Image: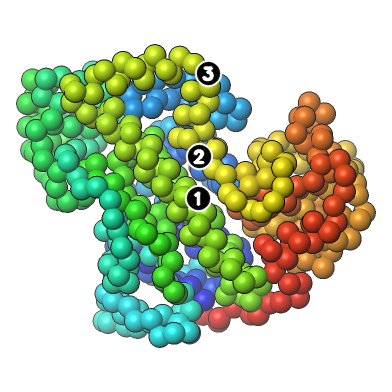
Amino acid sequence: MDADVIIVGAGPTGLMLAGELRLGGAHVVVVERLEQPTGQSRGLGFTARAMEVFEQRGLLPWFGDLEKAPMGHFGGVQFDYTVLQDAHFGARGVPQSHTEDVLERWAISLDADIRRGWEFLELDEKGDHVEITVATPQGVQRLTAPYLVGCGGGSSPVRRAAGFSFPGTDATRTMYLADVAGCELRPRFLGERLPGGMVMAAPLGEGVDRIIVVPDVEPGRERERTVSFTEVADAWQDITGEDISGGTAHWVSSFTDATRQVTEYRRGRVLLAGDAAHVHLPAGGQGLSTGVQDAANLGWKLAAEVTGRAPIGLLDTYHTERHAAGARLLMNTHAQGMLFVGGPEMSPLRELMGELIQYDDVKRHLSGLVSGLDVHYDVGEGTHPLLGRRLPPRTLTTPSGDPVTTMELLHQGHGVLLDLADDPALRAAAAPWQDRVTTVTARPDPTEPVLTSTTALLVRPDGYLAWATGTTPDPAGLRTALHRWFGDPGNTTQGTPQ
């Protein structure tokens, strides 16, 4: 075998997955068609939950100064996301090229093997492994591994080659996107609707503007196609009357409102993540962010599988958990598309949304939906309010009096038993799993009612609560959860040498 896992695609999802797999002890090879990163800005940020995922791995300092945007929108209707605790609209102004650079450097620092200029051609599933054919600078080669993950974007060749079903709705319109210099455009941050369509413009600095053009009459086409700046400039002038043809385009692209999701995220030894599994209208940085969360969910589970630590059925939870999350993503982006780029017939709906969004309950619901903070997995029985939800970022105090954040506890990609009541019985129950679950004794801030009424929390490597107990210790319940999510103590095998 050439690796434990082969990943096709070195975008944000593939690179995040490579790092996660390496943290879990799996040997990974990433093959990427492009010889060099595009350097294109594309997505300009990520959601609050994606920011937490990066913080869980200690990656936020790698990005430099990040600006959280408290104000966001839903389908162009603006409101304050901070009405929900920990929520914000996300980190703004971060080019996707910068995110990819951070994740690639992180994956390489963990010894991930990234092979650029290697193009996936075909696959053959052999029963106990997958064999792929790739075109490389040295000619056609074959690679084998127990598992293959397609992270190659919305046009995923792995998805097509493996025969995944990809139902959904076809595109109804094509939209143009470009970064242009020398046009001195008036900002239109939330878009401006005019008789011929909708346009957006936002300054990126140094005389460069990000523009989006949505003609009302433009038919839906393939998701991504080659497009010229002349087409974009003509569409802009048709709608606004402004001539931007004298500007210089740093890059141009097109996208559509097609909405699709694979029916299964895993078929045997082939899995999909990110845009390979779901495509939708870009809205609020949710595409990149959901792909990162797919990778965080899959990485520790697949690593446990290939290193012999996984309990039966663990890898199947990737589909059950992330397919549901992806369906909610498609629901909300489809709704936002109707509001945001719909024609005059959507005006009554926009007016109604403007009224509803004045209510704090509506704001909290929508901010949780778009930020990704409302993701809730079914992890089994229990009534604790955090069960199945993400561990929130909080500062704790260790027995020595030193502060530690809940995010720091997850830097190594291990499970964590958070002992909040200095309970030796719970620590003893978790001891047999010490190779995969780190036990930390700490005190919560007394102003945090949920944590102060909690004895202990079992946190999965992706930051979600697998088990929790209130004021009554429950060693038996902890052992059950440890077996369910982390397998039998002592079960492990070495990864495949590269």
Nearest to N terminus: mark 2 or mark 3: 3
Callout 2: 10 Å neighbours few (<14), some, many (20+)?
Answer: many
The picture places residue 170, in percent across and down from the top left corner, at 20, 48
**How far is disc 2 from disc 3 in space, using C-alphas?**
18 Å
Nearest to N terminus: mark 1 or mark 2: 1
The quarter of the displayed image where residue 497 is located: bottom right
Residue that mark 3 sits on: 360
Mark nearer the viewer, 2 or 3: 3
Whether the residues at callouts 3 and 1 have beta carbons within 8 Å, the answer is: no
The picture places residue 70, in percent across and down from the top left corner, at 50, 23
Q: Is residue 243 above or below residue 118?
A: above
Q: Is residue 138 left or right of residue 92?
A: left
Mark nearer the viewer, 3 or 1: 3
The quarter of the displayed image where residue 269 is located: bottom left
What SS does tag 1 mark? helix
Q: What residue type is disc 1 on? A: Gln
Numbered mark located on residue 43 in the image: none
Q: What residue type is disc 3 on? A: Asp
**How far is disc 1 from disc 2 in space, using C-alphas?**
9 Å
Residue at figure coordinates x 71%, y 77% from the top left = 491
Residue at figure coordinates x 27%, y 67% from the top left = 160
Residue that mark 2 sits on: 372
Whether the residues at callouts 1 and 2 have beta carbons within 8 Å, the answer is: yes
Q: What residue type is disc 2 on? A: Gly
Q: Nearer the viewer, residue 211 or 310?
A: 310
What SS does tag 2 mark? loop
Q: Is residue 477 left or right of residue 247?
A: right
Residue that mark 1 sits on: 293
